[in-house]
C-alpha cells in the first residue's frame, strides 16, 4: 500500500480542484490528500451545509485556500468556485470530478423500470457535470492540465444491484474519450479512473454491497480490496508529467478484478 507521506513531489506548484469529498473515506479525499503530499495546492468543495462539518476539518488538514459549497446543479455555486480559482490562482492544472448520484428509486430495481426523472438526475449529476466542469476548467488550464473522473466496472459489465448507474457510468467513460479528443490539442489530458468497490458513502446506496466487496476481495488476483490511498496515488501519476503521453483512458485500480471472466 502506498504511503501518501512518501509520494514524490511530482505535482509541486500545481493547482488542483477536487470535487466530491464527503468524508475521510471518500475516494475524492484519497485524491486530495495524495495530491497535496505530492506538492499540489488544493481547492476543495462541499455539497451543502449538512456536509460542511464533515469536510471542513479535512480541508484544514490540507491548508486549502479555496473551500466553497458546490452543488453541481446550481450554476451560481459553480460560477463562484471557478471565479475564486481565477482570482486567487489565475489558472488550474488538475480537476478531479468524483461525484455521482442517483435517487434510490432509480438505483434499486430493474434498469428497464427506472423512472425518467431518476435517470435524468443520475445523468445530470454523474455525467453532464463532468462536461460542465471541464468546459469551465478549459480556459484556466492555460499550459495544459489533467481532468480525472471516477467510473466503475459496471460501466462495461452488468454488476448486480448497480442498476441505472451502469449505463450512466458507460456514458461517463464515453464522454471522457470525446473530451480527451477535443481538449487534447490544448495539452489537456482526460481520464476515467475505475476503482474496485470501496466502502464509501456513495456505495452505501447499493444493495448487498458488503457481499460484493467480499466477492471481489476473494476473487481478485490481488486477493484484497483497494484503498483510497492507492486510488489517490494512481491519480497523482496520471496528473504528473510521467503520464504526459496518456489520455482518454479508463484506468482500472481494482487488484485485477476486471480481467476475470
Image (cartoon, grey):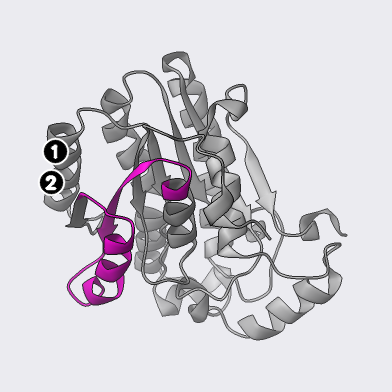
Q: Is residue 60 depicted above or below 97 in this figure?
A: below
In the image, 88 versus 102, the foreground residue is 88
Q: Which residue is mark 2?
A: 80
Determine the residue positioned at 42% across, 34% down.
Answer: 12
Q: Position of residue 212 (x, y in %)?
A: 70, 78
Q: Position of residue 235 (x, y in %)?
A: 55, 45
Dots 2, 1 in contact, CB < 8 A? yes
Q: Is residue 245 left or right of residue 186?
A: right
Q: Quadrant of the C terminus?
A: bottom right
Quadrant of res 163:
bottom right
Furthest toward the top, the residue is 185
Disc number placed over residue 83 in the picture, else none: 1
Specify few, some or many for label 2: CA neighbours under 10 Å numbering under 14, 14-19, or 20 or more: some
**Residue 168 falls inside the magenta stretch:** no
> Under tag 1, what secondary structure?
helix
Q: Is residue 190 left or right of residue 221?
A: left
Determine the residue positioned at 32% across, 27% down.
Answer: 138
Q: Position of residue 180 (x, y in %)?
A: 50, 28
Is any part of residue 151 visible from this angle? no
In the image, 166 versus 42, the foreground residue is 42
Q: Is residue 59 left or right of residue 122?
A: left
Q: Position of residue 217 (x, y in %)?
A: 77, 74
Q: Quadrant of the N terminus?
A: bottom right
Specify few, some or many for label 1: CA neighbours under 10 Å numbering under 14, 14-19, or 20 or more: some
Furthest toward the front, the residue is 6
Quadrant of res 124:
bottom left
Is any part of residue 216 visible from this angle? yes
> Under tag 2, what secondary structure?
helix
Q: Is residue 204 depicted above or below 225 in this figure?
A: below
**Residue 57 falls inside the magenta stretch:** yes
Determine the residue positioned at 39% across, 74% down.
Answer: 103
Range shown magenta: 36-65
Amino acid at each position: 500500500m502506498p504511503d501518501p507521506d512518501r509520494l514524490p513531489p511530482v505535482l509541486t506548484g500545481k493547482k488542483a480542484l477536487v470535487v466530491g469529498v464527503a468524508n475521510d473515506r471518500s475516494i475524492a479525499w484519497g485524491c486530495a490528500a495524495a495530491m497535496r503530499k505530492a506538492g499540489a495546492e488544493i481547492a476543495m468543495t462541499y455539497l451543502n451545509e449538512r456536509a460542511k462539518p464533515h469536510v471542513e476539518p479535512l480541508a484544514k488538514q490540507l491548508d486549502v485556500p479555496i473551500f466553497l459549497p458546490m452543488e453541481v446543479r446550481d450554476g451560481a455555486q459553480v460560477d463562484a468556485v471557478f471565479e475564486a480559482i481565477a482570482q486567487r490562482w489565475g489558472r488550474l492544472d488538475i480537476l478531479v470530478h468524483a461525484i455521482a448520484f442517483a435517487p434510490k428509486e432509480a438505483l434499486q430495481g430493474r434498469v428497464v423500470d427506472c423512472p425518467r426523472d431518476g435517470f435524468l438526475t443520475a445523468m445530470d449529476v454523474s455525467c453532464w457535470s463532468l462536461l460542465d466542469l471541464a468546459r469551465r476548467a478549459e480556459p484556466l488550464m492555460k499550459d495544459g492540465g489533467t481532468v480525472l473522473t471516477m467510473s466503475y466496472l459496471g460501466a462495461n459489465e452488468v454488476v448486480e444491484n448497480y442498476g441505472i448507474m451502469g449505463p450512466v457510468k458507460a456514458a461517463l467513460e464515453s464522454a471522457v474519450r470525446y473530451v480527451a479528443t477535443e481538449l487534447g490539442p490544448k495539452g489537456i489530458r482526460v481520464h476515467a479512473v475505475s476503482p474496485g468497490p470501496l466502502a464509501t458513502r456513495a456505495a452505501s446506496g447499493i444493495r448487498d454491497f458488503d457481499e460484493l466487496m467480499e466477492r471481489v476481495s476473494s476473487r481478485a488476483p490481488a486477493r484484497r480490496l483497494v484503498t483510497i490511498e492507492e486510488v489517490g496515488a494512481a491519480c497523482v501519476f496520471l496528473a504528473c508529467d510521467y503520464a504526459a503521453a496518456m489520455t482518454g483512458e479508463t484506468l482500472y485500480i481494482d487488484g485485477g478484478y476486471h480481467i476475470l471472466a
